[in-house]
Image: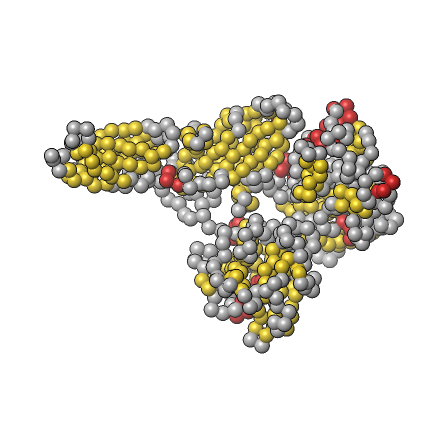
Amino acid sequence: MKQKTVRSLALALAAVPFTWSACAVAFDDIQFWAGSGTNRAGIVIDWTDGKTSQSILWGYRWNGPTTGLDMLQTVVAADSRLFAHLGQFGWGTAIFGIGYDLNNSGGFNTTPALSFDNGGLALETGSTNASDARVPADAADHFVEGWNTGFWAYFTKATQGDAWASSWVGAGDRVLADGAWDGYSFAAGFNSAEPSERTPALSNPFAIEVVAAQGPFGATPYDDPVSVLGMPSTNFYDPWGGWSGGTTVRRVKLVEPAYNLDATQTHKLITTLNEGSSIVARFEQPIQDDPAHPYGVDLLVFGNAFYTSSGFVNDSADMNTLMLAGGGFFEPMKVSVSPGYTGKPGQSSTNWQTWDWYRYKSGPYADTAFPTHAYRWNRTNSTWSNESMDFTKPVNPVFGPALESAGTAGLSAADAIDLYDGSGGGTGFDLAESGFTSIQFVKVEGLTGFDGGEIDAFSSVRPMVLGDSLTVTPENLTNGSATLRFQRPTRPSETALTLSFTAVSKMARVATAPLPDTSALTPYGRVLNGGGFAVAPLLGSNSVSFGANLRWAAGASYQGNGQDLAPLRQVGTDWENVAFSFEAASRSALVSGVTNSSTFALIQVLPPRITLAIGVDGLGEPLATVNFAALPGWTYTLERTVDFVHWNEVTSQTPLPAGWTALNDSETAGSAFYRVRMNRP
């Protein structure tokens, strides 16, 4: 038997560059910035409690000398959802506990309770009140405290690309430099670990301050302008509830609006604006005119409008059988927006009347469509759930006429809730009309013919991410609003998927999901993006036919020309190659003419890792077998050399499903070296 000596070489792929960098969180990913100045630093807080968004990211700007403790306290003061319990000692300041209003309920405290100041700090002398047993009063929130059985570990790094290092000094002694990062990670049992993957913190989406208010307002309890701050009402106390059926504490719903006081009878809910009155409210952070906002809506205004129905309404009413009568009870009022003080000649930073304002003279109007709806309805069991609707997600504006004529369309209240698609309602405003790139102030006025309505709350709109859903209809195609964008869940500032519909047969819900597990794809290359989308009827069960073009973004870190990209579509448990074109401006792979709900993955192809096995064939002759993971539709050619000058083709293969592939050589005696060349479809 002849002896064969073989060697393996890494894949040679002509004309395809493989330059890429690791996907790391950068300053561009930060959504919430505190402070002002030319220097920037990042701060990460990891509660290590296993809850969604366990680790959250903020940014800090400053000029002049500053410390890590300054950054923490400034961020806590700026973010109304963030809280800290600190202790002062002769040697410095200790961090006992940190909390975060994770479900954005608008209220936060702990058990045992703490007294937080207006800046979100509970600052004490010594450790007498430190408690390892302190937990969030709302189990859905973050709060961890440690002193005797755990502590907040402090990590630092000089730049984004550095590794985390445990700090040898406290936050009060840490002098920040431009580009620095600080990390806090709770170490239960004093077992510390660096902060994990982080979710950018989002600013409070609701108005936080009444800048100015001018009456006349309504009679009590509709006379307090402060009622418009915070999230929209979800429950209310109806003193006549026993007479009208059901209980006195009611859920806010699109057929029964907020009224009177909250469920505890201690807080006013809505404010009536009579003729001559106005309210100016401020948001924590500017609201951007962002193309990633659904349906072009950037701002939501909530009132106490409602859709009329054909029967008695209370929490016991069956939304499946309660029919809409057609029309809504609306009391329109005009809305204006402003970026605030911009330094223009004649403007005063303390006088809102000197700023630039844009009034939506021809609508939309406050206290009209779409009425507030607080909770999801369970159609199957004909009952309410305790799952809140999303007050930062708008209703598709094209549904306005359909809901207002629902009586002739035969829509039930449950149908209307389905059309909301998880939204909490609100009247939507597109900032593009205003000409402002961003605004931070909103004004509602009671003007002649546009007065007597109510305001409950104001909210900014968030971009949807993979995992969210949106709706699309034939009307969206007609008015040019049939492009839906979904961002990366961990990077809401970066688009993951753009769905541009070219056809849709009826009202449809477009649900998305991120790739649950990419481990099966990593042998083929670097997974840059991916997820699934499903188009289903919004009402009824008849299928939806559609056509769409998909843009899967390769991401900001991708610097190639598209030649090394491979979009794959899942078919059962296999993956198939998909034809695409590369759009350099958006660094996206465009897949055109998709007509079926599908799951995709976008791969940056990397040289496969090949293994070489020596055996014998059926005749007892030496057999060299090269194994590697192969992409579907790509042609793989095994080549042999004995002198590294002349390469001979041995065999080739074009696998259809992705998977492990073997190429064999039984022809060479003596010493030989192999390489695998691949060519894209």
- Identify the residue shown where x is 63% and y is 24%: 541
How many marks on residues? Answer: 0
Query: In the drawing, does residue 548 fall left or right of residue 248?
Result: left
Q: Quadrant of the C terminus?
A: top left
Above/below status of 519 relative to 225: above
In front here: 291 or 330?
A: 330
Residue at 79% in and 45% down = 249
**Viewer-proximal residue among 48 and 442:** 48
Q: How are the residues colored? A: secondary structure
Residue 386, quarter of picture = top right
Q: Residue furthest front?
A: 381
The residue nearer to you, when weighing 88 against 625, is: 625
- Which residue occupies 16% across, 31% down? 620
Examine the rendering and report whether any part of residue 449 can be seen: yes
Q: Quadrant of residue 248?
A: top right
Q: Residue at x 67, y 32 (%)?
A: 380
Determine whether, in the image, residue 646 is placed left or right of residue 306.
Answer: left
The quadrant of the picture occupied by the N terminus is top left
Give how far across and how far down residue 597 sits, in percent: 53, 29
Outermost residue toward the left in this view: 1
Q: Quadrant of residue 87?
A: bottom right
Which residue is the extreme one toward the bottom?
90
In the image, residue 411 lies at what x, y percent? 73, 27
Left or right of residue 423: residue 614: left
Residue 434, image x, y percentages: 69, 41
Q: Relative to 128, is 440 above or below? A: above
Residue 440 visible in the snapshot: no
Q: Please provide percent x and percent y for residue 636.
A: 30, 31
